[in-house]
């Protein structure tokens, strides 16, 4: 493994490793996935820059496809590509599980064409399971991008992978410099975090998932009780609140979400002491207790009642 200070950095390192390993430049990535704020991956409307100030030409080395559409990948992939980069579960889009067989077929196609498969597990790593989404779904990539949960609150990012994929770094051929790469404080936190999760995985992961399922069911019940256009999706210990519609079944439904109304929902929860991302994404952690869940339910009840009024 190689260590940096954020998930955004780790994505850049993984892409560099894949290009070094294959001698190719183009990559395939997917809409509805987020891979950090750097110019070459920060995607916005119409596959253009995600914000002002970006270099539009930085996006030209990537072919962008619809996440979950295996037919599009089969038509596009070839031995010209260095890597396929994706979130194995589309957490940033709203906690969407991969379609049945999607990850397995991506693995087959990348192996067939000698393309490096990169899973961006910055969110799913150490959250869906100790081994992340790849353990949860039983599909192993060539490279994994990790961050967030690995550092237990301290800044960290990591790239881990097979011996063959990581050879450019292991051999020293690929330059990987940075003042805070592998800094002792973050590494010590990461080691302690992984040891704790490993030793207590049998209790932590089922509990977090059960708590998230309980919260999602409560949100759905209360939205119906107060006659509110609020939907919820849950995957493992993560939940996503949507406003403006009653159900979100497919990724395409997200386009119909009322983002301003979603902000109203999350603001109502913040006023009652529950902080999620403004766009409605909420994570549970191993530190959350049943009392925390009860307090969150109370905030939901009060917030939904206020919105209904």
Image (cartoon, grey):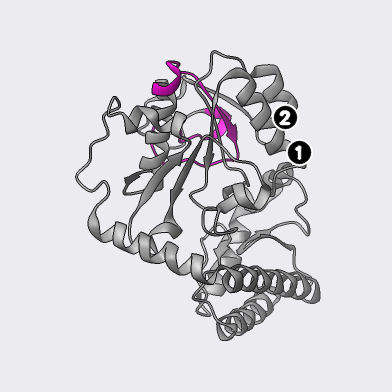
- Image coords of residue 12 (percent x, y): 39, 34
Do callouts 2 and 1 mark residues in contact (Cβ within 8 Å)? Answer: yes
Q: Main secondary structure of the magenta part?
A: loop
The quadrant where residue 244 appears? bottom right
Report the label total: 2
Q: Is residue 68 visible?
A: no
Instruction: Please determine whether, in this image, residue 124 is positioned above or below residue 163.
Output: below
Q: Closest to the observer: 172 or 82?
A: 172
- Image coords of residue 243 (percent x, y): 68, 59
Q: Earlier in the sequence, mark 2 or mark 1?
A: 2
- Tell me the mark number nearer the camera, choosing from 2 and 1: 1
The residue that mark 2 highlights is 70
Furthest-left residue in this view: 179
> Along the horizontal axis of the image, is 153 left or right of 94?
left
The residue that mark 1 highlights is 101
Q: Which residues are magenta?
A: 20-47
Assign the C terminus to one quadrant of the image. Answer: bottom right
> Along the horizontal axis of the image, is 229 left or right of 64?
right
- Image coords of residue 53 (percent x, y): 35, 33
Q: Is residue 32 visible?
A: yes
Tell me, yes or no, whether the highlighted magenta stretch contains residue 307.
Answer: no
Inter-mark Cα distance, 2 to 1: 9 Å
The quadrant where residue 68 appears? top right
């Amino acid at each position: 493994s190689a260590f940096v200070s954020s998930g955004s950095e780790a994505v850049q390192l993984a892409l560099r490793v894949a290009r070094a390993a294959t001698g190719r430049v183009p990559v395939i990535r997917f809409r509805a996935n987020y891979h950090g704020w750097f110019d070459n991956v920060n995607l916005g409307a119409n596959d253009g820059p995600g914000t002002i100030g970006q270099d539009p030409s930085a996006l030209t080395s990537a072919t962008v496809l619809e996440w979950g559409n295996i037919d599009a990948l089969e038509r596009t992939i070839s031995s010209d590509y260095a890597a396929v980069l994706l979130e194995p579960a589309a957490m940033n889009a709203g906690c969407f599980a991969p379609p049945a067989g999607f990850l397995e077929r991506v693995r087959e196609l990348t192996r067939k064409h000698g393309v490096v498969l990169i899973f961006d597990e910055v969110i799913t790593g150490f959250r869906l399971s100790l081994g992340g989404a790849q353990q949860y779904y039983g599909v192993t990539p060539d490279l994994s991008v990790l961050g967030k949960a690995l550092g237990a609150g301290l800044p960290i990012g990591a790239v881990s992978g097979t011996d063959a994929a990581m050879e450019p770094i292991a051999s020293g051929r690929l330059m990987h410099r940075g003042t805070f790469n592998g800094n002792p404080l973050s590494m010590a936190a990461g080691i302690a975090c992984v040891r704790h999760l490993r030793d207590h995985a049998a209790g932590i992961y089922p509990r977090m998932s059960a708590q998230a399922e309980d919260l999602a069911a409560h949100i759905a019940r209360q939205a119906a009780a107060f006659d509110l256009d609020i939907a919820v999706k849950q995957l493992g210990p993560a939940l996503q609140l949507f406003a403006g519609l009653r159900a979100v079944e497919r990724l395409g439904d997200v386009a119909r979400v009322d983002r301003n109304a979603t902000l109203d929902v999350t603001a109502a929860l913040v006023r009652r002491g529950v902080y999620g991302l403004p766009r409605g994404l909420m994570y549970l952690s191993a530190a959350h207790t049943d009392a925390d869940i009860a307090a969150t339910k109370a905030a939901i009840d009060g917030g939904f009642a206020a919105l209904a009024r």
